[in-house]
Structure formats: structure tokens, C-alpha cells
Image: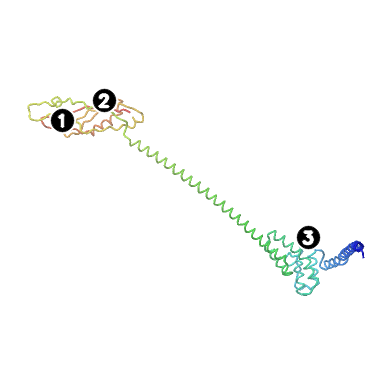
């Protein structure tokens, strides 16, 4: 047989097979779609209708208040429990509130009839929606309620992997909340420490200012005491005038007697104290004081003969002369009294 003819026949056979394959695929697709709409979907709707309606549908009583739980759930029979469960499904009460939700009613049905297919199928069909509801509670950080709902889901399907995801999210939310609370606590502590530091620094500053104030006051007081204790301005005291008595006239001359004659000699003077009234008034002046030098070298009969201004410096001059000490005048080898005058100057 000619090889070329054989190849042409094979090509024609392959070309005829392609439309057949396409037709088979189309028929199968039509059968699958028809099975969905004619068999599977009606079956699911029937099951959901028995269970109380499509879980994702709008709740008929979602806008109203949650009805109170039945009076005596424990005494209800299977049909009554299924009726309460369907009502809860219609109102989207999958897991809450506690004691009045679809999952608890269906679980009670299974306690009474472990093989109840309606309750088993309803729990399986509504599990994803109940898990979504539990996740919303977790995101709202109602941790006690979240744990209760997860435990309720675990009673319905303990091996469902969604439980692991929900538990992980709950744990993550708890840790996140703990971290945020700790951050708030740390921030509050930082603010308290900053406030305490500021208060401490202010107290230290106030204390330092008070100490400086006290030191300044003490320095002023010390300066005032030193000013009061400082001797008055330089006062010029006139030289002692020679005595005019007979002893002076004969000083240093012999009388034919074996004794010695000499004038009184000042051995200890005293500066007068400047009167405070004169200091305050910035006054200067002088006073001439007459006095007697006794044989013992002390002064007596001290009196002012003249002064300027009158009576301003008299007392200071007399007090100063009262402290003078002399070697007394000598006549014929014996100490004798003598008289003297002295001008005392008071100058600022």
C-alpha cells in the first residue's frame, strides 16, 4: 500500500475524531450543570428548608430584640427543639445568646437522637456561618464570649480545622490587647516619672533659690555687723601741748637739790570713738580738753574748754583722754601732779 495514502487516511480519521471529543465534553458539561440545578441544588434547598432556611439570608427578626429563651428547654421533644433551632437560624442566632441559639438546640436534638440527620446536616451546613460569627466576636475582643462560642463549635465538629484558626486568632487578640494595655501602662508610668522629675527639679530649684536668698540675707547682715564694728574714719589727734605749770618751767634744770625734775610723758594713748550722730550727718570737728595728770600717771579733772561744733564731740574726747596713761611729772625726784590741754580732731 502506498505510504502517502495511509498518512492521508490517518489525518482524515484524526480530523473526524476532534469534533466527537468536543461534543462529548459539551454533553458532559450540560449533564453536570443539569445535575446541579435539577438534583444537587434542590436537595440542598430541601435540607436547608428542613433546617430552617438559608443561613446567609436576611434574618427576619434581626432588627428586633432577641426573644427570651424557652421556659423549659430540657423538657422539649425533638420536634420542639428543631422548631426552636429553625427559628434561631432565621434570626441568625447561630451561637448566641447563650441558651437560645441554633447550635445548642441542634446539639440537644443529637443528645436525644444521636442519629438525627436533620440536626447533623444543619450543624454541618451552618458551621461556616457560625464560625464567621465567632470570628466577629473575637475581633470585638469579647474574649469570654469568644471562648464560649469556640467551645460550642467544638462540640458540633471537634476535628474542624476552622477551630484551630479561631483559637489562634483569639490568642493573638488576647496578646495584642495585653501588649496595648502594657503600652498604656508604660506610657502612664513614663508620664508619672516625667512629672515626678519635673516636680523634683522644681523643688530643687526652689530650694536653691531659697538657700541663695538666705545666704544673701546673711551676707548683708554680716556686712552690716562689720560696718558697725569697723573703727571710725581716721581721726587726727593734736600733739600734746607742753605743760605750763611750774614743773614744766623747771624741767631739765637743777634747783640745787639732789632730786630730778621732768615733765609728764604720754605712754599710752586712746583713739576717740566717732559719735554715731556725727557719722550719720557726715560731720567733722574738734575739741580742746584740759585735764590733770595725777602722780600715778592717770588723768583726772577732764573737761572740754572749747569745741566745734558745740557739744558734738565733747563726750568722745573726754572718754578718750580718760584712757590716757602717763609717766607723771617729777620734781626733786618725786612724782607731782601736772596739768595739760590737748586738741582732738574729728575728721571724716
Horizontal relation, residue 40 to residue 148: left or right: right
Occupied quadrant, residue 308: top left
Q: Secondary structure at mark 1?
A: strand
Circle nearer the viewer, 2 or 1: 1
Q: CA distance from mark 2 to mark 1?
A: 25 Å
Q: Which residue is mark 2?
A: 306
First in residue order: circle 1 vs circle 3: 3
Horizontal relation, residue 186 to residue 328: left or right: right
Q: CA distance from mark 3 to mark 2?
A: 124 Å
User: Within 10 angstroms of label 3, few (less than 14), some, or many (20 or more) residues?
Assistant: few
Q: Which residue is mark 3?
A: 62
Residue 17 position within the rendered picture, expressed as x and y whole percent measured from the top left: 90, 63
124 and 273: which is toward the camera: 124
Q: Secondary structure at mark 3?
A: loop
User: Within 10 angstroms of label 1, few (less than 14), some, or many (20 or more) residues?
Assistant: many
**Position above or below: 16 against 268:** below
Amino acid at each position: 500500500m502506498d505510504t502517502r495514502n495511509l498518512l492521508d487516511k490517518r489525518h482524515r480519521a484524526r480530523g473526524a475524531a476532534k469534533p466527537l471529543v468536543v461534543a462529548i465534553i459539551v454533553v458532559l458539561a450540560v449533564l453536570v450543570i443539569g445535575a446541579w440545578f435539577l438534583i444537587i441544588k434542590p436537595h440542598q434547598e430541601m435540607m436547608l428548608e428542613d433546617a430552617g432556611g438559608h443561613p446567609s439570608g436576611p434574618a427576619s427578626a434581626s432588627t428586633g430584640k432577641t426573644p427570651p429563651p424557652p421556659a423549659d428547654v430540657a423538657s422539649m421533644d425533638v420536634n420542639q427543639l428543631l422548631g426552636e433551632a429553625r427559628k434561631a437560624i432565621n434570626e441568625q442566632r447561630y451561637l448566641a445568646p447563650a441558651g437560645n441559639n441554633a447550635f445548642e438546640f441542634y446539639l440537644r436534638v443529637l443528645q436525644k437522637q444521636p442519629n438525627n440527620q436533620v440536626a447533623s446536616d444543619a450543624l454541618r451546613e451552618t458551621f461556616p456561618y457560625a464560625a464567621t460569627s465567632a470570628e466577629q466576636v473575637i475581633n470585638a475582643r469579647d474574649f469570654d464570649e469568644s471562648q464560649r462560642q469556640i467551645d460550642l463549635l467544638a462540640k458540633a465538629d471537634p476535628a474542624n480545622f476552622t477551630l484551630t484558626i479561631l483559637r489562634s486568632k483569639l490568642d493573638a487578640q488576647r496578646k495584642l490587647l495585653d501588649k496595648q494595655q502594657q503600652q498604656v501602662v508604660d506610657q502612664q508610668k513614663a508620664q508619672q516619672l516625667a512629672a515626678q522629675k519635673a516636680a523634683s527639679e522644681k523643688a530643687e530649684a526652689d530650694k536653691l533659690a531659697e538657700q541663695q536668698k538666705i545666704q544673701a540675707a546673711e551676707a548683708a547682715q554680716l556686712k552690716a555687723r562689720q560696718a558697725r564694728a569697723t573703727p571710725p574714719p581716721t581721726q587726727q589727734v593734736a600733739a600734746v601741748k607742753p605743760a605750763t605749770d611750774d614743773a614744766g618751767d623747771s624741767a631739765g634744770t637743777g634747783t640745787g637739790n639732789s632730786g630730778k625734775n621732768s615733765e609728764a610723758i604720754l605712754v599710752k594713748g586712746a583713739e576717740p570713738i566717732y559719735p554715731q550722730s556725727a557719722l550719720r550727718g557726715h560731720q567733722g570737728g574738734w575739741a580742746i580738753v584740759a585735764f590733770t595728770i595725777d602722780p600715778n600717771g592717770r588723768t583726772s579733772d577732764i573737761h572740754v574748754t572749747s569745741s566745734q561744733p558745740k557739744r558734738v564731740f565733747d563726750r568722745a574726747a573726754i572718754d578718750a583722754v580718760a584712757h590716757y596713761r602717763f609717766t607723771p611729772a617729777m620734781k626733786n625726784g618725786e612724782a607731782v601732779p601736772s596739768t595739760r590741754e590737748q586738741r582732738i580732731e574729728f575728721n571724716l
